[in-house]
Amino acid sequence: MLAFDFLNHTQTKGKTMMLDKGLGMNAVTDLLQTSGAELDYAKFGFGTAATMDRDLVAAKIDLYTAAGVTPYPGGTLLEAALAQDKYAEFLVEARALGFLAVEVSDGSTQIGAQTRERVIDRAREAGFAVITEVGKKNPEADHELGVAERLHLIQTDLDSGASYVIMEAREAGKNIGFYDANGAIIEDELDALASVGADKLIFEAPLKSQQAALILKFGPQVNLGNIAADEVTALTTLRRGLRGDTLGRV
């Protein structure tokens, strides 16, 4: 039973994707004790999984998996593998380490449509759930992607078998995707992107203001990503209306 359980009410909870940028075993254990029930995905951010001892990566994956959290390597690592013509080896190693999903992206590189579809197919054939990401890491390149092109990419990825499509916002959440230079939501762009079905998307929302705004717009069931490890519980309070930003509004 939760403390103050009488203040909780049943509600549909959206997916929460947390960014693990190199947590140690103790940090992961503490995180899962306090927030594991509210966490769905643990992304080993960018290429961090390739900078740690192999046994440590596998041990962290085991902790996440045992807690019901789906761990997966960041899309940039897959991009690096493709650039070095090592995708087959990447899939073998990801499976051996225990990852349950992979992220397909071209935020830092350029992957053609046919290649992207084949990459998704091969990952699924290897037994992975696939999460894709739409958007570029470089703001200038990202601004060249119009809403119509983003919608096309989203629908194509979903048709190819992606479980969810992430809307790129990086760690800063400013001047990229549907966020302006101050991190505020560009409403017409968000509305257009959500037309495919908000339940199929994971909105990267590293800032509290963004998390609150998306929860108020779509409800507690909105899927949110790039949540810092020490902000998972804080996000839960927003979803449950236990924080001033959403109290009495969800």
Image (cartoon, rainbow, N blue to C red):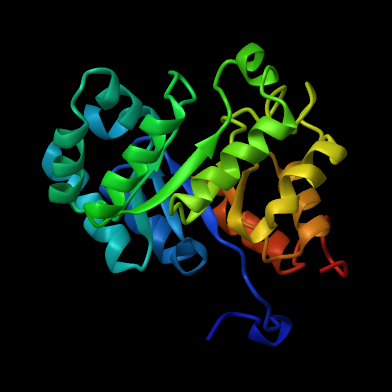
Whether residue 5 is situated above or below residue 230 in the rendered picture: below
Single out the residue that lies furthest toward the top.
140
* Front residue (pair 140, 32): 140
| Number of numbered tags placed on the structure image | 0
Which image quadrant for residue 168? top right
Q: Residue at x 61, y 64 (%)?
A: 14
Q: Residue at x 51, y 38 (%)?
A: 133
Residue 136: give x, y in percent of width and height: 56, 23
Is residue 45 at least partly visible in the picture?
no
Whether residue 32 is situated above or below residue 95 in the rendered picture: below
Single out the residue that lies furthest toward the front.
114
Residue 79: give x, y in percent of width and height: 35, 26
Whether residue 138 is situated above or below residue 39 in the rendered picture: above
* Front residue (pair 193, 49): 193
Residue 121: give x, y in percent of width and height: 32, 47
Residue 33: give x, y in percent of width and height: 40, 65
Is residue 69 at least partly visible in the picture?
yes
Residue 205 is left or right of residue 28, and the answer is right
Q: Residue at x 78, y 21 (%)?
A: 181
* Front residue (pair 243, 150): 150
Tell me the quarter of the image containing the C terminus.
bottom right
Residue 224 is left or right of residue 230, and the answer is right
Q: Residue at x 32, y 59 (%)?
A: 64
Which image quadrant for residue 92? top left
